Image (cartoon, coloured by chain):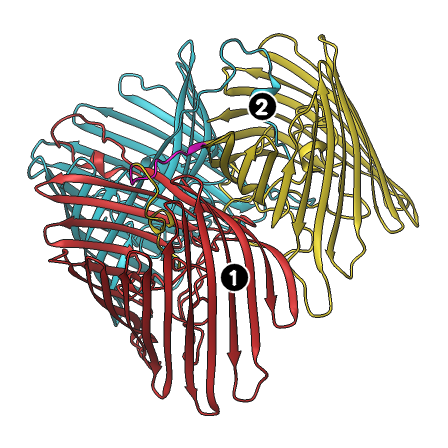
Chain colours: A red, B yellow, C cyan
Amino acid sequence: MKKSLIALAVVAVSGAATAQSSVTLYGIADASFGVVKNGSVTQTKVDSGLLNTSRFGFKGTEDLGGGLKASFLLEQGFNVDNGSSLEDSQDGQTKLNQMFSRNAYVGLSGGFGEVRLGKVWSAFDEMKGASNAAWDSGLSPNSGVFYGGAIGGYTYNPRNSVIYFTPNVSGFSGAASYSMGENKTATVNAGRVAALNVKYAGGPLYVGLGHQTERVNGSVPTKKFTMLNATYDFGMATLQASVGRQSQNDLKTRDWTLGATVPVSGLLSVSGGVAGSTDNVAAGDIKRKGVSLAAQYALSKRTFLYTGYHATRTTYPVLPRLNTSLYAVGVSHLF
Amino acid sequence: MKKSLIALAVVAVSGAATAQSSVTLYGIADASFGVVKNGSVTQTKVDSGLLNTSRFGFKGTEDLGGGLKASFLLEQGFNVDNGSSLEDSQDGQTKLNQMFSRNAYVGLSGGFGEVRLGKVWSAFDEMKGASNAAWDSGLSPNSGVFYGGAIGGYTYNPRNSVIYFTPNVSGFSGAASYSMGENKTATVNAGRVAALNVKYAGGPLYVGLGHQTERVNGSVPTKKFTMLNATYDFGMATLQASVGRQSQNDLKTRDWTLGATVPVSGLLSVSGGVAGSTDNVAAGDIKRKGVSLAAQYALSKRTFLYTGYHATRTTYPVLPRLNTSLYAVGVSHLF
Amino acid sequence: MKKSLIALAVVAVSGAATAQSSVTLYGIADASFGVVKNGSVTQTKVDSGLLNTSRFGFKGTEDLGGGLKASFLLEQGFNVDNGSSLEDSQDGQTKLNQMFSRNAYVGLSGGFGEVRLGKVWSAFDEMKGASNAAWDSGLSPNSGVFYGGAIGGYTYNPRNSVIYFTPNVSGFSGAASYSMGENKTATVNAGRVAALNVKYAGGPLYVGLGHQTERVNGSVPTKKFTMLNATYDFGMATLQASVGRQSQNDLKTRDWTLGATVPVSGLLSVSGGVAGSTDNVAAGDIKRKGVSLAAQYALSKRTFLYTGYHATRTTYPVLPRLNTSLYAVGVSHLF
């Protein structure tokens, strides 16, 4: 049951008896109106989170003295168009009723870097969106193109995780995460997700390298994800590019993206690009391509109008090819 | 994944870099203790939301300058008696795990009126409770009498909606909403909910007219709901009345309610009335009637004691008639 | 639908029209890293709530004048390791999607004591953890030892409840709660949970006596739970002990626990103990034993590092005995 507060348990902490609360309630409500074409079916839709996943959260940081800080973050995704909870995407794991489907962790940070314990973005999650044009969103060229291939789903923000972030040293930083499947039985080992990233960010240049391995449990072949990405800010525009590969035994996928983001004015920004992915499967290659062009306009520091076009094409060895497209206008409001 | 905040994406917004948060946490906890009779079964119960649906929410408004405002509202219903989430009521739609089952929207308002995008009260929802005695609650005479008839359920606060509110011009105002079913297939068109209201409120008089059409999808007959309602404040009492009709092809329902609310003192208010509904079905008419009397007493500006009696009778052409009744006392606390 | 706020219904409450909001957002994020052994399977895990169940809540108190206060509390449990909602544990009741699985109530308090209506800790819940070593947590010696026996599950924080707390008179206080099953049918009476406690706390001594009866419905034999517990603060250490018994017709269980908590310094506290439980079943006795040793260190008034060891052994008349153990380190952060 654990009703009693730990604060009452340790009696003699000096000073005032009442713990000072320190929590920030924050979030994003992002709604859009669009026309979605999926093969031969076209319909108009109200959607959520096209530019930024709609979310709310509670977070806080406490200074413990001596450079040490405690922090926590609890964040739930939701669909502002229908009010529903967002579930997490966990390959081979039981569905759970999610209260904080995006992030839920306690962290300690100091000169040594930072450690977080809970449900966190993996070290691969933490780098793999950095070079996606159109602000790493549902309007990015790689949306619906990456991670839907031969080896199946990628596990975002894995459960039961610990992640370590190094301090930033002359622009270099890194992170390593390990997530436990906790599904060990007498005969089969537990699954796990392990990930690593190394980044450099200095002046106009960002470069990142990430790697993630996943296995559902000890009797399923391991999936491997690798990505190298980079951005360069020329002032007039920022160029963005990545190359990646995924594999699970003989199944292999290669992907890439190329884009640019142009700050037209202090308030208006335009971004677009292309992305591709190729699966090597026995029957022949499956190819997915995506193209995007999007713009956002700042009504204020926390309210943004946006519009964008995104299309994908998937070409199969035998099956007819599949086209999708999306044109939408929306508003993203931060609180 | 869309991790990055849009605020970081648009670099050059002038002024301080940090977005100022502006969110209000609000809600109602409404618990009651009552005796409920349903046919031959009588039991005592603790219930939730009898006077005001228990709820919590996050909301905020941001002044964008030039008379333009951005707003958001995220509101979840719950049962304070058992801690459970309230789901929404969507005719023919998939059940979803609801995070914000009541409202979830982003809005922009200005001289032109207001537009909201997300999950909102339809234009019919926005007017149809205005003349219900006993504060449009579970103690209202029409509770359990309206919208349970021949044509089946009414869709409250539909998903995937856009609603437009006109400005108030000399007491006149209106609203129109459209909600997309988003269930189109290659052979069947998507469902939708479309609604409209026109209101006049001036001095002691309120009059409203509303209309809503619903179809689950393109192959199901459309349901139509219409209501005319009015209230008149005589000072000693406010009279409240409505007439409505619903139809789906040959199935037709007519309903009405009549009530009064009396401000006995600054703290005590009493309200009651009657309501009726008649279905025209092949085998003969199904008639439902409701009667209510309720009172609330303000312990403060945000804490209210209430008590009330509500009974319904349903008469069938063949089946024996069904009686229900409820007597309860409760407390409604706003925060 | 009940959209309208009750604050608008009672027009003439004197003073400013706007209700002042008063709500505190609070919670605990508790994450740990440990090695768990269950029979022959050992695995490392990230867990949630080992010292204090991870939770968040909204609460508030309003002074109504004349010594009367209104209050509310809405509290949800969650797992910080995977972001999932915690459900409640209700013997024989339908599972519900929980929004506030721990507590959800409105209360009124004054010179007469306090009444709460909603989902509350029963009067037995309110006393039964008071003597558990290791801060009544997942590291307590009785964890996994109590309430898993012959008569099956105990119903924590029952739904549809009313609880009354007496005022504290010279150290004596008591509480009584009643929770309605609300599952009455034409032929079977509803279930219920009824509980009572009496406590004395004065100087170094605490003594409590509690009793709870549960029945799923009128045709299922009643379960009875009784516990006597006490703690005595010797300064150097606080001794903690309890004896309890449960029964359902011929099925009987006896349990006990014994422990001590030592405040090593103002910041460090160590606690440990043993617990046992014996079921009298037809085939012979089933015996469960637990042993624990734990420590917590206050990094601040609201951030705690902890570590602990907990082991249980269950001995069956025929089946081989089952051992479990847990060693963990964690952090508990209050906000």
Q: Which residue is pictured at 49% across the width and 26% down the height?
A: B334
- Residue A186 occupies which quadrant of the picture? bottom left
Magenta segment includes B178: no
Q: Position of residue B91 (x, y in %)?
A: 69, 51
Q: Magenta part mainly helix, strand or loop?
A: loop
The amino acid sitting under disc 2 is Ile
Closer to us: C52 or A88: A88
Magenta segment includes B22: yes
Q: Is residue B276 left or right of residue C254?
A: right
Determine the chain carrying the residue at label 1: A
- Reading the image, the residue beneath label 2 is C6
Q: Which residue is pictured at 39% across the width and 62% down the height?
A: A133
- Residue C189 occupies which quadrant of the picture? top right
Q: Would you place residue A235 above or below residue C12 in this image? A: below
> Can the viewer see residue C85?
no
Q: Would you place residue C44 above or below residue A113 in this image? A: below
Q: Position of residue B272 (x, y in %)?
A: 73, 20
The residues colored magenta run: B16-25
Q: Would you place residue A219 above or below residue B147 in this image? A: below
Closer to us: A130 or A266: A266
Q: Which residue is pictured at 39% across the width and 12% down the height?
A: C67
Q: Secondary structure at mark 1?
A: strand
Q: Position of residue B55 (x, y in %)?
A: 52, 35
Q: Nearer the viewer, mark 2 or mark 1?
A: 1
The amino acid sitting under disc 1 is Tyr
- Reading the image, the residue beneath label 1 is A309
Any mark on residue C160, and which?
none
